[in-house]
Image (tube, helix red, strand yellow):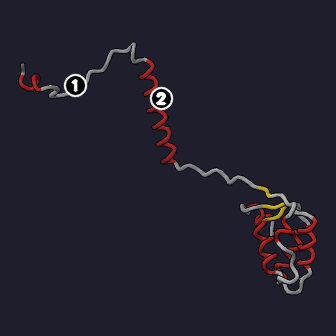
Amino acid sequence: MSEDEDSKNNGLIIGNTDSIRSFLKSASADPHLSPDLQQTASTLASQTELPYKHFRALWFASRSETRPKLSRLLYGSQFIFSSPKPREKSEELKQRLKKLADMAERNAYEELVKDITPRKTANEPFSSYKDQLGL
């Protein structure tokens, strides 16, 4: 587990407590776990915050008769939530939003000056029946 992997981790993060630290230290020496999981447990034991998915993987890999209950391990631990990075807007969306903002600004301006400016007459080719007949 490298620092790059930790920085990319965007799941639940939990605070390390004495009970979690004790479990991780025992897991780092557990012969039933793979060397990779033992190394992960050893690394996580020294951290103040750890990814829940790594902790859960260690807990599930441990033998059920020797591991403590998950609720007892998590008791008193803090859950640390992080906000995801904001999504990047595409150029097409940026242009559309700019166009809509310009239209909204234009409409707001026209609403402000509607009493001052002359009304625009709509030139309808056949506005009424009388106009059509030429009466």
Residue type highlighted by circle 2: Glu
Label annotation for residue 4: none
Locate residue 16, reporting x and y percent: 88, 63
For disc 1, the neighbor class at 10 Å (few under 14, some 14 to 19, many from 20) is few
Residue 117 position in % (x across, y down): 37, 15
The answer to whether residue 112 is left or right of residue 119 is right
CA–CA distance in space, label 1 to label 2: 25 Å
- Apparent side of residue 119 relative to residue 49 in the rendered image (left or right): left
Give residue 110's quadrant in the image.
Answer: top left
Identify the residue under disc 2.
Answer: 105
Residue at the top extreme of this rendering: 116
Query: Residue at image x 91%, y 68%?
Result: 19
Q: Which labelled disc corresponds to residue 123?
A: 1
How many C-alpha atoms fall within 10 Å of the one at disc 2: few (<14), some, or many (≥20)?
few
Label 1 vs 2, first from the N-terminus = 2
Which quarter shows the N terminus? bottom right
Residue 115: image location, x then y, percent: 39, 14
Residue 51 x, y percent position in the rendering: 79, 65
> Decide: marks 1, 2 in contact (CB < 8 A)?
no
In the structure shown, which secondary structural element does the residue marked by tag 2 occupy? Answer: helix
Q: Amino acid at mark 1?
A: Asn
In which image quadrant can residue 52 be found? bottom right
Please give the name of the residue rendered at 85% of the width and 60% of the height, measured from the top-left corner.
77
Q: Note whether 7 is above or below 131 in the view shown.
A: below
Q: Residue at x 77, y 75 (%)?
A: 57
Q: Residue at x 92, y 74 (%)?
A: 25
Element type where label 1 sits in the image: loop
